Image: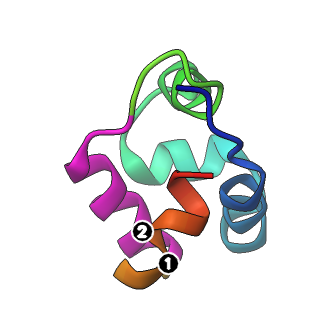
Amino acid sequence: MVYSYSKLKGRITERYGTQASFAKKLGISKNSMSKKLTCKTEFSQSDIEKWSELLGIEKGEYEEYFFT
């Protein structure tokens, strides 16, 4: 399934300035992040939880950020 992560990308920019800065905070490569944001690899439940924690996304908001 292909999702649009525009809202998630906006939140990353809002909180961390760049995707590279956020990738560093997550401890993953920019390439790994890019693959997730372009639907080449899926988000695991633990990915969603970790990203949400760092981005200030509540559980009730997961759908609007990760499943649209």
Of the pair 47 and 13, the residue shown nearer to us: 47
| Mark 1 Cα shell of 10 Å, populated few (<14), some (14-19), many (≥20) | few
Q: Is residue 15 above or below residue 24?
A: below
Task: Residue under label 2, please give it.
Answer: 52
User: Residue 53 appears at what percent x and percent y?
Assistant: 36, 74
Q: What is the magenta segment's predominant secondary structure?
A: helix
The disc labelled 2 sits on which kind of residue? Ser
Task: Give the secondary structure at mark 1.
Answer: helix
Image marks 2 and 1: residues in contact by CB distance under 8 Å: yes
Outermost residue to the left: 46
Task: Residue under label 1, please give it.
Answer: 61
Q: Is residue 58 visible?
A: no
User: Residue 28 appears at what percent x and percent y?
Assistant: 40, 34
Q: Is residue 68 above or below residue 39?
A: below
Q: Is residue 47 visible?
A: yes
Write the start and end of the magenta stretch as one range.
43-55
Q: Quadrant of residue 43?
A: top left
Q: Is residue 8 above or below residue 34?
A: below
Horizontal side, residue 36 vs residue 48: left or right = right
**Residue found at x 78% / y 51%:** 6
